[in-house]
Image: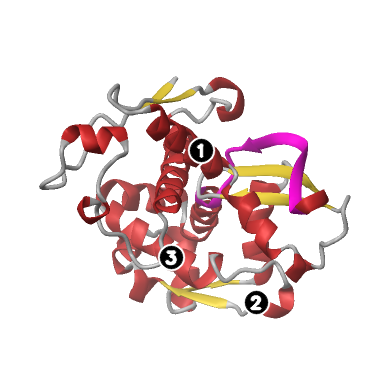
Amino acid sequence: MLGLSHAKQISNPGVDKDERNEGNMPEKKKPALPKGLEYKRAITDYLTEIGKLIKETVATRWPNINFMEQVLLIMTVPAEFSEQANASIRECAYKATEAAVIYCMRTLKEHMITEVGSSFMIVDCGSGTVDLTTHELLENNRLGEITERSGDFCGGTYVDKEFIKFLRRKVGDSAVNLLYENHYGQLQYMVQEFCHHVKLPFTGNRKDFKTYELDIEEVCPVLKQYVTGTSKVKLEKDDWIIDLEYEDVKNMFDPVFSWRV
């Protein structure tokens, strides 16, 4: 069970506590929001990102937990909040879980989904989890949920782990272990370089892919001192450059998403 508390409130000079909690704060005393940003949207976006962080944290610390079945989220609000304020928070929390659906409702026409009864699947890919739901377009521009939300721990960070496995095959387990123990920051920098140049641009379409050259001397030179044996001989011959081909990268994605294919 996880609790999300709003115990700490950011004070606003000149605002009476009762005004703030009862939702009767004068307009001139309310915190300024960027032009065009409605306050409920700000709350919804905040709760959406908090939800993603919770899922990723649970996946990291308790990898064997089934988030959908074994985690109960409890969000608390200050006791002084009015029913109106509680209703607003409740509405925003609900919208946060359906943010992808709301976005799809606004873009249905772009994807030629305009006929009542049409169905589509939403794949919400985070860094630690992937959630799937199937929806149906109803009358009056409404959406119905055909299948119950399902998901698993197989987001973007798991692709990073597959990249580390690939790296192990190229430089050896011992080299990666020593890099992890002694220069963790450089290992993470190399992973981020992989994400920026390979993982994020990857579409799955072979014609869109260009071979990426991972230059160890440039990206992570300290790794060289830990590489030995045949791995070292080969890398020296290749000027410490490791080529990532289409099949290499595809093989990093396949195990991560094969649970739903």
Residue at 69% over, 43% down: 132
Q: Nearer the viewer, mark 1 or mark 3?
A: 1
Q: In this view, does 215 lie to the left or right of 202?
A: left
Give the secondary structure at mark 3: helix
Disc 1/disc 3 C-alpha distance (Å): 58 Å
Q: Name the residue under label 2.
A: 209
Q: Position of residue 20 (x, y in %)?
A: 24, 38
The mark nearer the N terminus, 1 or 3, is 1
Q: Mark 1 points at which residue?
A: 91
Hey, what amino acid is under mark 2? Phe
Q: Mark 3 points at which residue?
A: 232
Toward the viewer: 158 or 95?
A: 95
Hey, what amino acid is under mark 1? Glu
Hey, what amino acid is under mark 3? Lys
* Span colored in magenta: 141-157
Is there CB contact under 8 Å for labels 1 and 3? no
Picture layout, residue 56 above or below residue 207: above
The mark nearer the N terminus, 2 or 1, is 1
The mark nearer the N terminus, 2 or 3, is 2
Q: Position of residue 88 (x, y in %)?
A: 44, 38
The image's colouring method is: secondary structure
Picture layout, residue 205 above or below residue 124: below
Task: Classify 10 Å Cα crowding around label 3: few (below 14), some (14-19), many (20 and above).
Answer: some
Residue extending farthest left: 13
Disc 2/disc 3 C-alpha distance (Å): 28 Å
Q: Position of residue 14 (x, y in %)?
A: 11, 46
Give the secondary structure at mark 2: loop
